[in-house]
Image (tube, coloured by chain):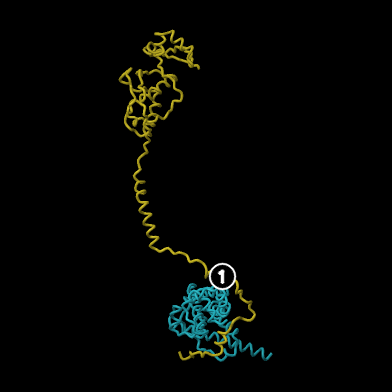
Chain colours: A cyan, B yellow
Amino acid sequence: MDLSQLIKEANQGSTAAQKCLFDQLSDKMLLLCRRYVKNREDAEEIMLDGFYKFFKNLTGFHYQGETALHAWLKKIMVNECLMFLRKKNVFLMVTETAADDIGLEEEALNNLSAAEIFNMIVQLPVGYRTVFNLYAVEGLPHAEIATLMGITEGTSKSQLSKAKTLLQKMLVKKGTDYGKRKTN
Amino acid sequence: MANEKQIEPSNWKNKLNALDSLPGEPVANKDAAWEKLHARLHEKPRRKMAAWYWLAAACLFLILALPWMITGKKDDNLVKIKLPEKSAPRKPITNVPAIQPQTAVASPVSFVEKNQTIKNNIKTTHHSKVPILKKASMEKEELLMAGSTIPPETNSTSADIVQPADTAGIVATVAVVKTKMRVVHINELETSAIVNPDQVASTMTHSPHRFRVSFINVRPSNNNKAAQHAYAALKIRFTN
């Protein structure tokens, strides 16, 4: 059964269709939440909150393809993650400081697997991680990131550069370790 | 910033979005998560009371409680206990002898009789409404003083004293006389014995309360001759 049919039946109140949608989309949404919130249990709660809002507002959604559905669901999940982080007052610790002048080799990221990239992002501090996810992965501008996080645009930019610096260092260390393993 | 290059939507981003699970991690329990979600989706929404509802309830409570709070403050005075009015008027008490002043040492018998007469006098003289606490204290004081002092004489020696019709003035006495005994003054005994010795003898034999009278003359001190002649200390023993 394709997504459009499932959404139609879910709108009519079919519990089976709702469960099918949940089973198809829950894994990706859980990993998305875990990129923002490191703790697994918290990520599961946020995912359930997001799906609750998804099903409650599904009647007003006009299906235009699988990509649009995924994008809409991702937006709901990201908002839930940011709300969770705002409640914890995590963004108060984010300050604007000068970043090291080290760029990120994006091509090096292409050589890594999805799981390795995921693990590297999760290791970043919460402020760096959030800005990197919103800018580099979700593609939001700094102005919107600043509004969502309650920080200034300059802080958003500095946080991003710090995140890239850290990731580069991780890549270098990984490459060194990879080089050592290769030689051995 | 010059160092900041726009990260191209390259493979690594697509790889990350396509990631379903992490290798080496346990599979998430979807059924349990779905049960939670299903329960939340189908639970009944709580009725949220509007703020105005609570405000209206608070105002209503104040309106109802205000009169009660105001009336509660007014009752600062002592509570006056009023006995219920009796329909039948009390029988008039007749032949209440006047209490003659006595300065001799009070005997137990005369002390009891004096208390009874004092109480009767208190009843007859009180016509106004007096708080019960004041009367109780007055009665206590009078009882204490009865052994040393004698209450004032009544104006009439044998007048018919009628209980006041205003039963509202009647106040419950503190001491309750359990056994109703005929109050008899010692002088009355003497006079009755002199007038009707036979009657006295019969009452003495047939009355339930037999008593033996023994007269003991206690000679007063030599200094007070008047006392020697006028007064004789009597010691009467009552035996039932």
Q: Would you place residue B219 above or below residue A47 in this image? A: above
Q: Nearer the viewer, residue A174 or B174?
A: B174
Q: Quadrant of the N terminus of chain A?
A: bottom right
- Tell me if residue B99 can be seen: no
Q: Which residue is most to the right?
A: A184
Quarter of the figure with residue B111 = top left
Q: Nearer the viewer, residue B32 or A170?
A: B32
Quarter of the figure with residue A147 = bottom left
Q: Is residue A33 left or right of residue B233?
A: right
Q: Position of residue B141 (x, y in %)?
A: 38, 29
Q: Is residue A52 left or right of residue B61?
A: right
Circle 1: residue type: Lys
Disc 1: which residue: B36
Q: Nearer the viewer, residue A178 or A60?
A: A60
Q: Quadrant of the C terminus of chain A?
A: bottom right
Q: Would you place residue A108 above or below residue B174 in this image? A: below
Q: Position of residue B120 (x, y in %)?
A: 37, 24
Q: Position of residue A19 (x, y in %)?
A: 57, 75
Q: Classify 10 Å Cα crowding around label 1: few (below 14), some (14-19), many (20 and above).
A: few
Under circle 1, the secondary element is helix
Q: Is residue B59 left or right of residue A121?
A: left
Q: Position of residue A47 (x, y in %)?
A: 54, 75
Q: Residue at x 45, y 79 (%)?
A: A148
